[in-house]
Image (cartoon, rainbow, N blue to C red):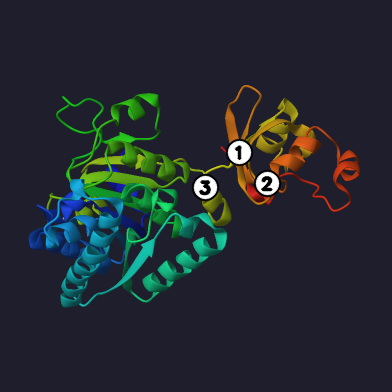
Amino acid sequence: MPRKSLVKNVKRIVVKIGSSSLTKNGVISGYKISAIVNDVAGLIRRGYQVVLVSSGAISTGAGSIGKRVKNLTIPEKQACAAVGQTLLMNEYRNRFKKLGLHVGQILLTEDDVKHRTRFINARHTLETLLHLGIIPIVNENDTVAVNEIKFGDNDMLSAHVASLINAELLILLSDIDGFYMHLEDPEPIEELYMINDQIIECAGGAGSAYGTGGMMSKIRAAEIIISFGEKMVIANASKKNVLNRILDGEKIGTIFVGKNRLLTGKKRWLALRKPAGTLVLDDGAVKAISIGKKSLLASGITASSGGFIMGDIVELSSHDRKKIGKGIVNYSCEELNKIMGKKTAEIKKILGDNVFDEVINRDDLIVY
């Protein structure tokens, strides 16, 4: 399909910039950051809304105090992030200001999008900044983030940000030209419409010396974007005016194209959450939620696993362990183990009158 037709309806874009695309030997490269800023400004002048997800805080901070990233402890990385984030934002602010544009900083952890209320608050902030014509610059809050609340890398963070604002396109800029099925291939693949086992196998490998993300993290981001029916491009930041050329329809990098089925709002938030357990359904329940678009009842559940509580997210699978959906559960695992396979009248005898009719309401359920 012509690349121009794939991007013609794009209005809102998230651009993720890798550390190697901003720094040189751990120091901010004036040439590299100016190229990005000018390219983004060009998109905004053309009427696009742009959110930047910018790496580089830790490497910039480490470089400024004479440290090497690979030798740092976690507290030292957090300290370097605190130093580097101010340097990085100051560079962005000064360069965008010369072009008549304002920026705003947003620092996120996975905790900020895991909880529904904070997810909505983050969305409102981003939406307001865009409405005011201010460029949001997002980074993971590395000064406080630990493994339990980290996205892992900014490829995944950018996919979450794209979800937050319903962006039609995510562009991942780094030091690679796209996705290669084989290392010896002269050119990257132009278009991909699904992520299969072969693609995942080909995505193995580490990132650059200053970044945390390799190709696998980019493929995981692509999985998210494809599941929402949106598009993602992996491209080389060193190409002149790469962002504007992508939006002009040039075949730069690899474009991942999602399905027609779009998720928005609550269900998009739900799709990104990690499940706390699994429910196994009988054939009737699978049919009811997949074809009949019904809520999930206890009578259709044959087994459960995980230590979930009421309000947690659980994955749904068929008896042959095929994943079929995900939803917010109305019962704890202990309660569910008592009532699975039973009708509402029986449930009331076991748990009392104050019970839910559904284990998962249709509004709190997505089907893959």
Q: Residue furthest top?
A: 320
* Residue type, mark 1 in image: Gly
Q: Position of residue 66 (x, y in %)?
A: 11, 58
The answer to whether mark 1 and mark 2 are in CB contact below 8 A is: yes
| Quarter in which the C terminus is drawn | top right
C-alpha span from label 2 to label 3: 13 Å
Residue for badge 2:
329
Q: Is residue 302 left or right of residue 320?
A: right
Residue depicted at 30% across the width and 52% down the height: 74
For label 3, the SS is: loop
Disc 2 and disc 3 in contact, CB within 8 angstroms: no
- Residue 214, position in %: x, y? 27, 39
- Tell me the amino acid under the disc marked 3: Arg
Nearer to us in this view, 168 or 138: 138
Q: Nearer the viewer, residue 68 or 336?
A: 68
Q: Judge from the rendering whether residue 98 lies leftward or rightward of residue 163; answer left or right.
A: left
For label 3, count other residues whose C-alpha is less than 10 Å away and answer few (under 14), some (14-19) or many (20+). some
